[in-house]
Amino acid sequence: MSTNLTDTIIALSTPPGEGAIAVIRLSGPKAISLVDAQFFGANLEQSEANTVHYGKIKDTKGVILDECLATIFKAPRSYTKEDVVEISCHGSQYIIQKIIELFLEKGARAATPGEFTLRAFLNGQLDLTQAEAVADLIASQSESQHQLAINQMRGGVSKMISSLRSQLIEFASLIELENDFGEEDVEFADRQGLKDLVNKILNVILELQNSFKYGNAVKEGVAVAIIGAPNVGKSTLLNTLLNEDRAIVSDIAGTTRDVIEDSIQIDGILFRFLDTAGLRDTKDQIESIGIEKTKEQVAKAQIILFVVEIEEDHNNIIEAYKKIPLKESQTSIIILNKSDAFHTCHSYDVEEAVSTLTSMTPCIAISAKEKTHVDKIKNQLVDLVRNFKTQASTVLSNTRHFEALNQTKTSLEQVITGLDNQVPSDLIAMDIRHALHYLGEISGEISTDDLLESIFSNFCIGK
């Protein structure tokens, strides 16, 4: 992605559609002068930075387009480190269109997706991890997502990466110096010191990677697949969890043919519940497609709610549970449903028995129909997600960062192997350079147009 920093760009920064107020943003060397020429109420070019002014925007024929507020920010004290003007006008689509057309005619250029934040990055206002956090903050739907984004915007990840990189650069320079004096057989870098440093960095990388399960789950919303045989109450459970009739409930087996998804927040964590088709052998072609989709969702989910009828024989429950293709990274809860029809005072003994026989898998007896003990499921879900979290001071939530750390780790492990095998310093230097490159890609100290295009094209246009 390339951008011309000599251009002045313009875009609507508030969501499209009717509203009381809309904000139109301009950034670039002519931002203030362009608006000043059409703004009547104050001389914006002579006004102090970070001030708000009331006036009227007129077109080239002197026709008033709107009464508005113009907020001016002068470089470098702005989001983009450029001159910026934000026009707060009425939220009429006609007014918005006319104001933007006016300044396009006067020489501004329509901003591309994420171009304001891209300029902030290119001008040194943000590093790449902080720029990505801006997009995460805009997209946040829960308290936990908001907190993750805020921490990253404050430089949590970038500070840690920068520290690792600077320590490694010091040793890399000494290794490179050795290569310059290769014929003289000298050593400037302490091999044991380098090995200790690399092991220290590897431990930090492992700590960050261990936090990714929690961070990514929170960022994307925790995927919870509700699975089980037909007619055990999966759809009723989904409706009860969501407190609305989201899924069709019927006594007819196979009613749910497709995956139904909806989200709720529990204790500040976003959960994405997936109600799936009942797992059974069937000759119905449509139902078979639904069952295949169920298996796909099970593979993607972080938590599995396995729903069975509480009156089912223990051995059948255990056998069915063991057939679920759970991955090592997944956790599960067994839901013993229809406790309202279980005429015994020993329902909690059933929970204990099934949990014990499935290697202490959490097991909860409920009645989805009567909404009893469903709160226990919610509490257990929150506990499971919080158990994902490690003691790491910084939580990793970005897949791009995780993959770059994986590549860094591979390069550093090769450094350790090279040191152990006393390989030539030029080969060790090459592996260190690779590690520095991948660390630099995370923060944006090393970037390519393709990388920037991939990141900023996902932003909204006005950001």
Image (tube, rainbow, N blue to C red):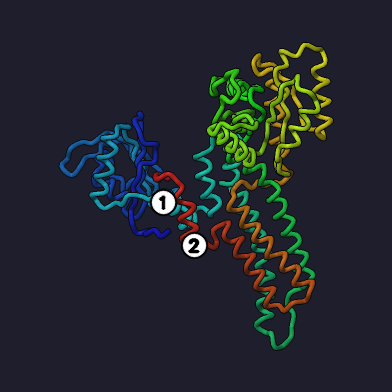
Q: Nearer the viewer, residue 136 or 188?
A: 136
- Position of 46 compared to 232: left or right? left
- The residue at the point 58 percent across, 61 percent down is 440
Q: Which residue type does callout 2 highlight?
A: Thr
Decide if residue 59 is on the left or right side of residue 251. left
In this rendering, would 120 be left or right of 221? left
Q: Residues within 10 Å of mark 1 (few under 14, many from 20)?
A: many
Q: Nearer the viewer, residue 190 or 290?
A: 290
- Between marks 2 and 1, how big is the CA–CA gap? 16 Å
Q: Quadrant of residue 250?
A: top right
**Residue at (74, 64) in percent of width and height:** 197
Point out the tag, 2 or 1, that comes first from the N-terminus: 1
What percent of the width, then of the height, locates residue 186?
74, 83
Q: Position of residue 381 (x, y in %)?
A: 69, 31
Q: Amino acid at mark 1?
A: Glu
- Is 19 drawn above or below residue 187 in the view shown? above
Residue under pointer 2? 448
SS at badge 2: loop
| Vertical comparison of 174 with 127: above or below | below
> Residue 173 falls in which quadrant of the image?
bottom right
The percent position of residue 336, horizontal first and vertical second, equals 73, 23
Residue 261, visible in the rendered structure: no
Of discs 2 and 1, which sits in the foreground? Answer: 2
Q: Residue at x 43, y 44 (%)?
A: 460
Residue 336 visible in image: yes
List the residue tagged with mark 1. 115
Q: Residue furthest left?
A: 61
Of all residues, the one furthest to the bottom in this rendering is 183
